[in-house]
Image (cartoon, grey):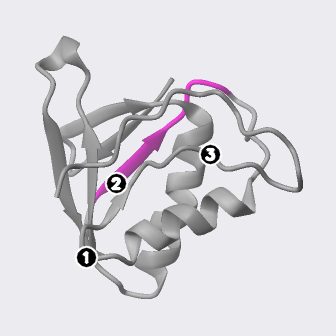
């Protein structure tokens, strides 16, 4: 279980595979100078609810991974995450789609934020 840390304070735990895909989408948007909101659901153990942060090129971001090996990349998942990042509601974690006819992974993903 990896961690995403925003501005040294706000943090959440995200499974390493999902965090890798989020990092690819986030860094691609920041390289283009495109700010955007990023939302996630909080675990009940920390009070539940939803957190949204505004990510822009000057943001301080940390992607901390538990495992040492980088997972394989699912291009379909990158595209699905990028689609949300380009929408007015911003980036949020969506379930991993199947790629090349394979079954999708069964990692539990939090639901999309309410509008």
Task: Quote the CA–CA distance across marks 1 and 2.
Answer: 21 Å
Q: Position of residue 95 (x, y in %)?
A: 54, 44
**Image depth: mark 1 or mark 2 in front:** 1
Q: Going 15% across and 24% down the picture, which residue do you hit?
A: 48
> Magenta region: which residues?
60-67
Q: What label sits on residue 61 in the rendered view?
A: 2
Q: Is residue 24 left or right of residue 43?
A: right
The image quadrant of residue 49 is: top left
Q: Position of residue 34 (x, y in %)?
A: 35, 84
Pick whichever, 109 or 30, lies toward us: 109
Q: Going 86% across and 44% down the picture, which residue do you hit?
A: 102
Task: Quote the CA–CA distance across marks 3 and 1.
Answer: 21 Å
Q: Which residue is mark 1?
A: 88
Q: Is residue 56 left or right of residue 93?
A: left
Q: Quarter holding the C terminus?
A: bottom left
For disc 2, the neighbor class at 10 Å (few under 14, some 14 to 19, many from 20) is some
Mark earlier in primary sequence (3, 1): 1
Q: Which residue is mark 3?
A: 96
Q: Going 20% across and 51% down the picture, which residue do you hit?
A: 7
Q: Position of residue 3 (x, y in %)?
A: 41, 33
Pick whichever, 54 or 113, lies toward us: 113
Task: Quote the CA–CA distance across marks 3 and 2.
Answer: 23 Å
For disc 1, the neighbor class at 10 Å (few under 14, some 14 to 19, many from 20) is few
């Amino acid at each position: 279980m990896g961690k995403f840390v925003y501005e040294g304070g706000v943090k959440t735990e995200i499974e390493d595979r999902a965090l890798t895909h989020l990092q690819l989408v986030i860094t691609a948007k920041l390289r283009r100078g495109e700010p955007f909101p990023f939302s996630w659901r909080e675990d009940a153990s920390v009070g539940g609810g939803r957190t949204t942060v505004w990510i822009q090129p000057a943001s301080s971001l940390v992607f901390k991974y538990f495992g040492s090996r980088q997972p394989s990349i699912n291009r379909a998942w990158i595209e699905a995450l990028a689609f949300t990042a380009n929408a007015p509601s911003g980036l949020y974690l969506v379930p991993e789609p199947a790629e090349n006819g394979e079954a999708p992974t069964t990692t539990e993903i939090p639901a999309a934020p309410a509008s």
